[in-house]
Amino acid sequence: MKHRVTDPLRLDVLAFASDGDELAGEWPGADLERLAEGQTLPQDALPSAVRWRLQGQRLPVAGGEAEIWLHVQAGTRVWLTCQRCMQPYELDLAVDRRLRFVRDEAQAETLDAESEDDVLALPRWLDARELVEDEMLLALPLVPRHELCPQPLPMSAEVSAEEAVPDRPNPFAVLQSLKSGRK
C-alpha cells in the first residue's frame, strides 16, 4: 500500500503511471488563465470550474521497455463569440485523451511521426493543470459558432438571382454593336 501524496501541480509521471494511480479534482476556471482569457464571459460572470481526472498506466511490451501512458479527461463550460452572428454563446468543452510518454525528445519526435498516438518526452515533473489547460485549448473549435444562430443574421447569405447580377448590357452585344457600327 502506498502512502505517497500526489501533487497534480508537480506530478511524477513515471511513478504515477508505474503505480497505476488516479487523481481527480476541480480547479477554478480563473486558475486556467489562458482558457479564461479566451472567453467572452457575460458581465460579472466568472469562468466555470474545470473538472479533471488523470489515470496513469504502465503497459508491459514483449521484448521491450514498458510504455508509460497518461489518460487525461476534463470538462467545463466556456463562453465564446459566434463568428457568424457575433453573439456570445456557451459551449460544453470536453477532453478525453491518452498520452504516451517516452524517455527523450528525439524518441518522442520519431514515434509521434509514426504513430496516431500523442507522444511526449517524459519530464521529471509535470504540471497537470497546465497539461489540462493545453488540452482544453486544443479542443476549442477553430471557428466558434452556434449550430443555429438565435437571431436572423443582419445580412442574408442567400442572394436572389436578380440582386446577384446588376442590369448591365451584355459585353458581347456591346462589342457586336461597335463592330457593326464601324462598317
Image (cartoon, grey):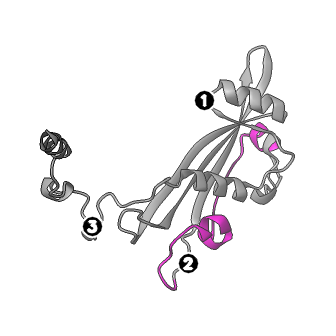
Image-quadrant location for residue 39: bottom right
Circle nearer the N terminus (3, 1): 1
Label 2, secondary structure: give it.
loop
Q: Closer to the camera, 142 or 78?
A: 142
Q: How many neighbours does mark 1 have within 10 angstroms: few (below 14), some (14-19), or many (20 or more)?
A: few
Q: Are marks 3 and 1 in contact (CB under 8 Å)?
A: no
Rendered residue at 61%/64% (across/down): 35
67 vs 169: above or below: above
Name the spot of residue 10 as percent of width and height, x first.
82, 56
Amino acid type assigned to the residue bearing label 1 in the image = Glu
Helix, strand or loop at disc 3? Answer: loop
Q: Which residue is mark 3?
A: 155
The image's mark for residue 46 is 2
Q: Is residue 44 visible?
A: yes
Q: Please state which amino acid type lies under the numbered disc 3.
A: Met
Q: Residue furthest front?
A: 183
Identified by mark 2, the residue type is Leu
Q: Is residue 17 magenta?
A: yes
- Relative to 39, residue 158 above or below: above
Q: Nearer the viewer, residue 161 or 121?
A: 161
Q: CA distance from mark 1 to mark 2?
A: 36 Å
Q: Which residues are magenta?
A: 15-44
Left or right: where 79 falls relative to 25: left
- Please give the residue where the numbered disc 1 appears in the rendered image: 116
